[in-house]
Image (cartoon, coloured by chain):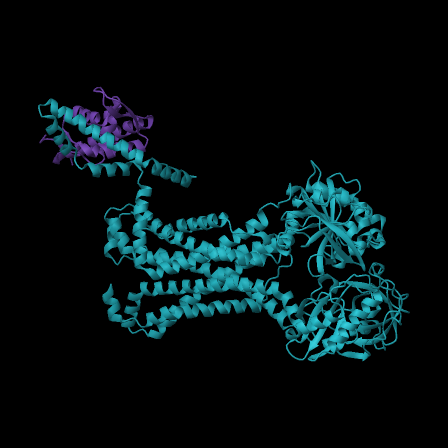
Chain colours: A purple, B cyan
């Protein structure tokens, strides 16, 4: 837990979209899934997840419906809408460009300038 | 549309709120349970696991709040909070709050009240069945200045034969009866109708039955229907009134009639009457004069459109039929008189006078609303600027623009809701006043009540004002220079606010100028009317109506009675003289301006084309002396000028000048030649001129040139009389004595409508006076609000420029120069406003001129006067802030920033 990185502002939405894109999940499931796909490297405060979820629902990127979980608890399941899928594609591309640019900037050597 | 969607979403979330809250709670609790399950699996006790899960989750309440905000359900929640905050903020500046609320209350109240009146007078349907198919048919003759000539029986017969577009025709004419059976014998206003009238009008009885086919014709028994108002107020809603027999006297005859029913409350048109009777009750309606006289017009014509017919097709058919009739009688329908026919929906006909006036006044109150809103907007702007530090801090602390806007909206909602509420309270009594006012122009205002539309209108206006006001102030913009706003004197959005304030002030002044100029026109008309001298003694002359009693007396006996009454009254102590005449000056409307054709003996050959017409007056000896009209030459009538004696006349000076220029008019002869005289029982015999009288005008308030011929009252015909009594002291104290004296000669003789001639004139002026007062009231209100506005703007400008003034004073500027600068600033704004108002007014009057042809532009002098008033007001309003600017202490001002 000590090695977990602080989340950059704005990246939580992207992670949620990505986690849900792999299949409908309830809130706790999304948290576990993010942990799983990021190799437990990111620190997400548990409560902070929910405002993000509500915001994405309101923006029409996620769709929520009540259902029953594997251990018979009533839970709210989230899945991607078409708009959410599109947003995930765009944001992923954006992120990759940004990461590549920052990565190459940080890797530059004095003689290359 | 976007605004609507937004509102719908906000409102939906508002109602979903409790449900959403429960679901959120459940979702978050489920999360903690899942986490606890996992922790339990790693070996903790359930209790410990749940505790840890809750701790890891963090601030439960905070996240819930954030979720709600993220879900968008918070708008009204926060608005409520903002409203509470707004109330607290507003309570801290009571002067601003009270001014704003009062201003809004005036604007909203006036509009809500006018809207209520317009709605019930102009927009609600009549009670008549299928009232949109009910039409009023009107004959007019612009060539003789007759707008509504009504119809004669032969005309109605000609027109209504074989009409296809109009299913049925109903006729109505008014007459006065001397009625016995309703308490004291008195004159009663009645409508006389045919058997189809009520069916055409589509009205129902509240008791008994209405008149129908069985009441038509010469052999039907006399029958009357009471109008609701007369039954309810005059007879105390007597339930046993049906079947009672009353006696109706007219034309020296008395007929009896049975009360058969009571009419439902309905709009009386063309005249308000107490009873409506069938034709046999009125001997006049059965006479040859009425039945055969093509020019004996006294009947109003109503129709009901046939199924499938439209107003347009009915008009077209009426014109065709009418064209045929006028072509068949060219001697009656002379081409130069331009006889024509038209039809209108009854609803529109009733409101013909009122609609223009009401819409104009509604426009004026609309202007007042604009002024009120602009003024409050100004106050708000000035306040926002003063609060910009607070707003900047809130913005810097992370409040979004939406949040700030919301709190401004909350404040303006509080203001406008209070203003609206106060406005409705103001409006409720105003509706009563307005209804009495509107009653002068339309009978429909008679049954007007305050209803919920008033409340809705007030609410709607308050909302409009609230949204407008909330979006007036500019917010600190979210650009990169945000940081600067806090430090550098926070003048950043002041410039644009100042501009806006000036714009609103200009609007206010323009609107005030418009109202002031309109009020000026009306006041000027009123003034010139009040200044007009009638040429008649009016203050000490009492007039009383002595209607004709039809109790079997011969015309000679009637004439004797009136003579006796006059003589007895003139011998009373305190009475200087008394006289009788047939027409009441100023009061008897249409009769007074009606002129009959006449000719001069020995002149008719040479000028047969000349259309000589004169007004006709029947007056007793002493009439001229009582009214103080000087005889130019000749003599007054004497008691010897009676029925059977030589026919004599007195002519007005203009008659003598026109007919006998440079010659002596005395002892020449004139005679009435008008075809109408046979209906009025006026003899066509030559009449000798025995006197020439100074010109007066007893029909118009401002004397107009006219030809008048006076004939002796005793030479008839007599349809009734007005007694004129000139007294030495206050005429009204004489009323009981005069009444007693007349009753001594005829115990049942009614003595009605007693008032001095001066008051009769004032009654005629009442309309104009009320018009001028209403507009004057509007203008005064508008001016007051605008002055507050101008003063506010300048005061704001001065406080904004305190530092500048300080520097200028420090550099040696004279305080008088600064004072003049502020004054000039105020005058400049006013000038722009006046010019704008003038331009808008000019445009509006051009536009309105298309609908209201009699509309006149005010004369330049009046415009200058209105402008001067506004300039003076603005200068006074500028003085206070200007004085403050000149007193600025340079050191203080510089230190303040």
| Residue at x-position 57% and y-position 58% | B436
Name the quadrant containing residue B773. Answer: bottom right
Would residue B796 appear left or right of B775 to someone viewing this image? Answer: left
Q: Position of residue B67 (x, y in %)?
A: 26, 36
Is residue B851 among the parts visible in the rendering?
no
Q: Position of residue B456 (x, y in %)?
A: 47, 47
Q: Position of residue B699 (x, y in %)?
A: 71, 67
* Residue ranking furthest to the top: A70
Total tally of numbered discs in the picture: 0
Give whichever of B714, B144 is nearer the camera.
Answer: B714
* Picture layout, residue B65 above or below residue B610: above
* Picture layout, residue B172 above or below residue B690: above
For the C terminus of chain A, give its image quadrant.
top left
Would residue B85 appear left or right of B860 to someone viewing this image? Answer: left
Give whichever of A80, B153 is nearer the camera.
Answer: B153
* Picture layout, residue B49 above or below residue B480: above
Give whichever of B321, B881 is nearer the camera.
Answer: B321
Is residue B693 among the parts visible in the rendering?
yes
Would residue B643 appear left or right of B139 to someone viewing this image? Answer: right
For the N terminus of chain A, give its image quadrant.
top left
Name the quadrant containing residue A104. Answer: top left
Q: Position of residue B500 (x, y in %)?
A: 39, 56
* Picture layout, residue B40 above or below residue B565: above
Would residue B20 appear left or right of B251 to someone viewing this image? Answer: left
């Amino acid at each position: 837990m000590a090695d977990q990185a602080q989340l950059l502002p704005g990246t939580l939405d992207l992670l949620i979209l990505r986690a849900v894109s792999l299949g409908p999940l309830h809130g706790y499931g999304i948290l576990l899934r993010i942990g799983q796909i990021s190799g437990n490297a990111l620190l997400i405060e548990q409560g902070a997840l929910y405002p993000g979820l509500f915001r994405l629902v309101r923006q029409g990127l996620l769709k929520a419906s009540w259902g029953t979980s594997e251990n018979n608890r009533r839970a709210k399941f989230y899945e991607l809408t078409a708009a959410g899928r599109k947003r995930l594609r765009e944001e992923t591309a954006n992120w990759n460009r940004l990461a590549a640019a920052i990565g190459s900037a940080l890797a530059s050597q004095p003689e290359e300038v | 549309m976007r605004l609507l969607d937004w509102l719908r979403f906000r409102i939906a979330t508002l109602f979903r709120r409790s449900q959403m809250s429960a679901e959120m709670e459940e979702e978050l609790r489920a999360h903690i349970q899942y986490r606890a399950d996992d922790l339990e699996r790693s070996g903790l006790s359930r209790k410990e696991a749940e505790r840890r899960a809750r701790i890891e989750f963090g601030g439960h309440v905070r996240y819930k709040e954030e979720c709600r905000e993220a879900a968008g359900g918070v708008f009204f929640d926060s608005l409520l909070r903002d409203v509470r905050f707004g109330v607290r903020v507003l309570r801290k500046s009571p002067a601003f709050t009270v001014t704003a609320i009062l201003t809004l209350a005036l604007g909203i109240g006036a509009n809500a009240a006018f809207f209520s009146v317009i709605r019930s007078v102009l927009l609600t349907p009549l009670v008549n069945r299928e009232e949109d198919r009910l039409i009023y048919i009107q004959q007019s003759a612009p060539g003789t200045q007759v707008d509504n000539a009504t119809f004669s029986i032969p005309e109605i017969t000609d027109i209504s034969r074989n009409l296809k577009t109009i299913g049925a025709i109903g006729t109505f004419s008014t007459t006065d009866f001397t009625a016995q059976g309703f308490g004291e014998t008195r004159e009663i206003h009645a409508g006389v109708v045919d058997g189809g009238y009520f069916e055409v009008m589509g009205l129902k009885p509240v008791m008994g039955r209405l008149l129908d086919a069985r009441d038509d014709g010469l052999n039907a028994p006399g029958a009357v229907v009471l109008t609701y108002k007369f039954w309810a107020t005059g007879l105390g809603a007597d339930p046993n009134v049906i079947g009672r027999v009353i006696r109706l006297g007219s034309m020296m005859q008395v007929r009896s009639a049975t009360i058969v029913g009571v009419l439902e409350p309905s709009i009386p048109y063309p005249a308000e009457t107490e009873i409506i009777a069938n034709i046999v009750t009125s001997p006049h309606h059965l006479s040859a004069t009425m039945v055969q006289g093509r020019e004996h017009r006294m009947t109003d014509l109503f129709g009901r459109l046939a199924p499938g017919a439209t107003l347009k097709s009915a008009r077209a058919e009426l014109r065709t039929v009418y064209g045929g009739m006028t072509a068949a009688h060219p001697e009656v329908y002379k081409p130069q008189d331009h006889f024509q026919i038209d039809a209108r929906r009854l609803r529109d006909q009733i409101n013909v006078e009122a609609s223009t006036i009401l819409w104009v006044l509604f426009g004026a109150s609309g202007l007042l609303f604009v002024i009120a809103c602009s003024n409050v907007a100004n106050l708000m702007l000035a306040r926002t600027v003063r609060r910009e530090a607070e707003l900047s801090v809130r913005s810097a602390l992370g409040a979004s623009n939406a949040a700030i806007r919301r709190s401004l909206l909350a404040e303006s909602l509080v203001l406008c809701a209070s203003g609206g509420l106060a406005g409705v309270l103001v409006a409720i009594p105003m509706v009563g006043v307005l209804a009495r006012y509107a009653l002068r122009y339309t009978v429909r205002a008679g049954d007007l009540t305050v209803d919920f539309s008033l409340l809705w209108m007030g609410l709607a206006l308050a909302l409009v004002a609230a949204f407008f006001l909330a979006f007036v102030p500019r917010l600190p913009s979210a650009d990169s220079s945000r940081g600067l706003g806090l430090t550098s004197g926070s003048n950043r959005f002041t410039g644009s606010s100042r501009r806006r304030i000036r714009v609103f002030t200009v609007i206010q002044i323009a609107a005030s100028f418009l109202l002031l100029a309109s009020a000026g026109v009306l006041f000027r008309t009123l003034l010139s009317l009040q200044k007009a001298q009638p040429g008649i003694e009016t203050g000490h002359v009492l007039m009383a109506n002595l209607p004709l009693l039809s109790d079997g007396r011969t015309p000679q006996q009637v004439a004797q009675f009136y003579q006796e009454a006059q003589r007895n009254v003139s011998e009373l102590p305190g009475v200087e003289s008394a006289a009788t005449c047939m027409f009441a000056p100023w009061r008897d409307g249409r009769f007074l301006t009606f002129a009959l054709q006449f000719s001069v003996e020995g002149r008719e050959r040479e000028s047969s084309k000349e259309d000589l017409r004169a007004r006709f007056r029947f007056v007793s000896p002493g009439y001229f002396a009582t009214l103080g009209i000087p005889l130019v030459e000749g003599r007054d009538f004497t008691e010897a000028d009676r029925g059977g004696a030589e026919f004599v006349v007195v002519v007005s000076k203009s008659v003598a000048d026109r007919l006998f220029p440079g010659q002596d008019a005395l002892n020449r002869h004139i005679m009435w030649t008008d075809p109408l005289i046979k209906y009025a029982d006026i003899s066509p015999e030559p009449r000798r001129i025995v006197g020439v009288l100074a010109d007066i005008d007893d029909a118009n308030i401002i004397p107009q040139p006219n030809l008048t011929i006076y004939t002796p009252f005793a030479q008839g015909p007599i349809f009734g009389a007005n007694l004129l009594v000139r007294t030495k002291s206050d005429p009204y104290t004489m009323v009981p004595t005069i009444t007693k004296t007349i009753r001594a000669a005829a115990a049942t003789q009614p003595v009605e409508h007693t008032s001095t001639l001066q008051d009769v004139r004032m009654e005629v002026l009442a309309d104009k006076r009320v018009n001028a007062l209403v507009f004057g009231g509007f203008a005064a209100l508008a001016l007051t609000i605008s002055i507050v506005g101008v003063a506010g703007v300048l005061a704001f400008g001065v406080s904004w420029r305190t530092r500048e003034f300080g520097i200028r004073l420090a550099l040696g500027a004279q305080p008088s120069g600064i004072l003049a600068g502020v004054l000039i600033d105020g005058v400049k704004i006013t000038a722009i406003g006046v010019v704008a108002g003038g331009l808008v007014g000019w445009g509006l009057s051009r536009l309105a001129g298309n609908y209201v042809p009699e509309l006149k532009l005010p004369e330049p002098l009046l415009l200058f006067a209105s402008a001067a008033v506004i300039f003076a007001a603005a200068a006074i309003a500028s003085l206070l802030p200007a004085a403050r600017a000149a007193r600025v202490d340079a050191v203080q001002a510089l230190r303040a920033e």
